[in-house]
Amino acid sequence: MLLVVLAGIAPTAALDNLTADPARIEEMTRDLCTFERALGSEERTAAAAYIATAMEERGLSVSTGRFSYSNCYFDPPLALSSNIIGVREGASDRIVVISAHYDTAVPETPGADDNAAGVATMLEVARILNATPLNRTVYFIAFGGEETGLEGSRRWLADNPDLHDRIVAAINLDCIASGDRLLATTLPQHRWILDVLPPCIEETPARLLDAARGDEHAFRAAGIPTIRLYERDSYAIIHTADDRPERLNYTLAAECAEIVAGTVVGLDAGGDGPGIDLSVENGTVIFTTLNDAPIEVIVDGTSLGVLPSGSVTLPKGPHVVQAVTYGPTGAKAVATVMGEGVEIVPPTVSGSAVTIPWGGKTEPGEDPPIHLTFAAVPLSYRLDRPEEVARVDGYFDGILIRDLEEDQAVIPVPGPHSFTVVAYGPDGSVLGVDRTDFSISSYGMVELDGGILQVDETGGATCLASAQTYTRTYTPSERYLIVVGCDYRDTADAFLRAAEFRVDGPGGQKCERRFFDVPVLNDSRREEIGFWLEPEGPGTYHWTISCSEGDGRAAETGSLVLS
């Protein structure tokens, strides 16, 4: 991933009329901080209404998307929230998304920099663009549920799959009003967005697994070019009572608004993406394009990042290969071919010349020990004796990547994956081999609240179960994670008894937990159980959740209706 430091940037001559007002941003930030916006707060509805009214005042067409989500670690475990969407229609159906989350992580914290100022800055962008004719349609979205797992952005993307291919770029604002400099971060696959920004001062790399996780991750998982603007000066105060409006730098926030407005204008020109010639020859991916534009290579849905022609060889079997590139204003070009791979056998793990600094190894048939929820993963390695290494190759799920650069960013499809790295000496001998296995979950998939189960021993064992029915449009290859919250309240000693929680899904799938009541000790706990649902097509899919202790029992059925 790339970080770009932006400091003291004045808009270019073409943007002279796009002047943001720090006082307006401060006023809206202070107003939003008067609302309690943490999970479960009734005032979040008032905050959402405030944002919707502000969008209407700026000439946007406003709608809201309410959603529910569950996590038994939260109180209450089942929560409702809303996304507020304001649309500025352009002359074309191509879209630029500008987003900022409005919820807070902790009750009784103002959440000024995280992220009332981000929302206020987004609204200021809408105001200063109001009189500027645009070809692109602009979506201004205030997301809810960011602090509890990017719930709002993930739900909006899941509910609007028809918009994905129309989105030119997404710009996320999160913590943008402390200190005196802004950072811009994007994936190398989408490096072209940085060229649309006003002039930058410095670029520095950042490791993907250490990156701050905002709503941009949901867009990355959907394969949408995304950039985040933020700063790090507030990290010591976010999620605390010290994140107050009076601590912020509203001049910096105004600069951020001007940068975003300028980027929208920069993205507004039309045009086509560069043409691509793509082929697979003896298992190796070959491509050419005009002006040597950077090419993102995608194999069977996994983005391997920006790579040179001839550097990727496919393992044996049929594969779908795509080459993607972008024009200077985001015009996208895609070439697709079917290709046959060749026999590839990665070397076995040996030596210590090269190591992968994260992950773990599994034996055949075992589940990967590392489960990641990052949209993008770095193919990281460390060389013990770099002076002896002439070349490093990587194998991602058996796909050979020659001359692998350290921390190459890939965007894997959900599921299990493997990464092998090989260090070669000048004579071609293998100096060392390392491997890691991991699984990608959550991002890129749809997580559904499968229900809540509760066993409460107050006044005897009381068992409760609740579930609901979802209606959605069937999307091929979409997977659902059905999550059920289990709440065991050990308020009495029930010697030699256990509270049992269970979910039974389609095709004989099941998951269960049993909590034993140890006398004297408080064994109360909250956990989650669930299963993966991979629909074969339209239809109705049911699951049954149940809990019991002693003579008490409760059960309920949840459903997913796909049309």
Image (cartoon, rainbow, N blue to C red):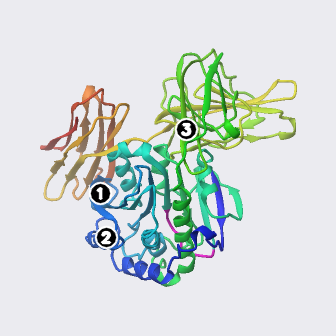
Q: Quadrant for residue 29, please give it.
A: bottom left
Q: How far across and how far down the image is residue 101, in percent?
A: 41, 64
Instruction: Please name the residue shown 41% across and 66% down the image.
Output: 105
Disc 2 residue crowd, few under 14, some 14–19, many 20+, Cα 10 Å: some
- Overall secondary structure of the magenta section: loop
The question of residue 434 being in magenta is answered with no
Select label 1 or label 3 by which is in front.
Answer: 3
Element under disc 1? loop
Lower position in the chain sequence, tag 1 or tag 2 = 2
The residue that disc 1 covers is 520
Q: Find residue 391 and report its horizontal and vertical position in percent.
A: 79, 32
Residues at marks 1 and 3, CA–CA distance in whole angstroms: 66 Å
Q: Out of 193 and 250, give the one closest to the viewer.
A: 193
Task: Name the residue beneath numbered marker 3.
Answer: 333
As helix, strand or loop, the secondary structure at mark 2 comes to helix
State whether residue 225 is above or below residue 130.
above
- Mark 1: amino acid: Val
Toward the viewer: 87 or 121? 87
How many residues crowd mark 3 within 10 Å: few (<14), some (14–19), many (20+)?
some
Please give left or right for residue 5 compared with residue 415 in the image: right
**Which numbered marker is on residue 56?**
2
Residue 373 visible to an observer of this rendering: no
Amino acid on which the number 2 mark rests in the picture: Glu
Q: Which amino acid does label 3 sit on?
A: Ala
At x 61%, y 71%, the residue is 11
The range drawn in magenta is 173-180
Q: x and y percent of residue 115 in the render? A: 45, 69
